Amino acid sequence: MFRYAFAAVLVWNCDLEKKAIDALGTSCVGGKPEEPEVPADLTGLLARLDDWEDGHLMEAVNTWHEEIFQHQLPFGNIDKEKNVVKYAANTHLNYYLNLVRANTTSIGPLKDGEVVYEIKSGGCSRDEDCPKGGSCNEQTGLCKAKKLSK
């Protein structure tokens, strides 16, 4: 797997949470839940946890992460000219690619054709390595976005 150029510290996005709740509607209530319909230009990160008391979000994350061990990244996702890995809908790696996306500062789905990450040596080492005026934590190699105004 290619190493990324930078990755961001994630924050929760309440607007994306509301969209996810709206997409779920009542599809997960009672009996056998049905997978909710996700807008065509977005990817749903879905997981079924039958016993939430014993379940944990990490179970879902681990399931999504397992995709990379079961499927190879298609060459069509790699743009060697721009030195980036791009998202392509309808692959077996949708969840994984959403998890490893480097240029996000809040949790939310990718759109078809968006860059997942740039291919470089891995992590930031200075503020200039980070997108949009972010700052670099040299210990973790993660970029921290500027505080968003409300």
Image: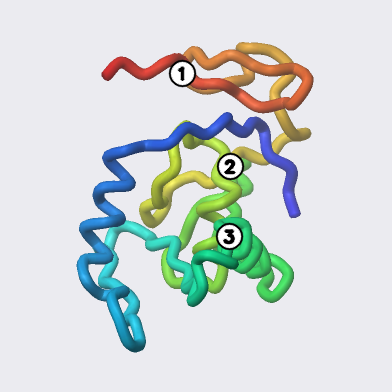
First of labels 1, 3 by sequence position: 3
User: What residue is rendered at 62% in x and 68% in y?
Assistant: 63
**Residue topped by disc 1:** 132
Element on which disc 1 rests: loop
Q: Nearer the viewer, residue 16 or 21?
A: 21
User: What residue is rendered at 60% in x and 48% in y?
Assistant: 100
Q: Quarter of the image containing the N terminus? A: bottom right
Q: Which of 11 and 26 is in front in this view?
A: 26
Element on which disc 2 rests: strand
Q: Can residue 74 be seen in this view?
A: no
Expressed as whole percent of the image width and height from the top left, the position of residue 137 reads 69, 18
**Residue topped by disc 2:** 117
Which kind of residue does numbered mark 3 sit on?
A: His
User: What residue is rendered at 32% in x and 81% in y?
Assistant: 34
Q: In this view, does 2 lie above or below 143?
A: below
Which kind of residue does numbered mark 1 sit on?
A: Lys
What's the colour scheme? Answer: rainbow
User: What residue is rendered at 50% in x and 64% in y?
Assistant: 94
First of labels 2, 1 by sequence position: 2
Q: Quarter of the image containing the C terminus? A: top left
Q: Is residue 147 above or below residue 143?
A: above
**Residue topped by disc 3:** 56
Q: How far apart are marks 1 and 3 (CA)?
A: 33 Å
> Left or right of 72: which side holds 145?
left
> Left or right of 110: which side holds 138?
right
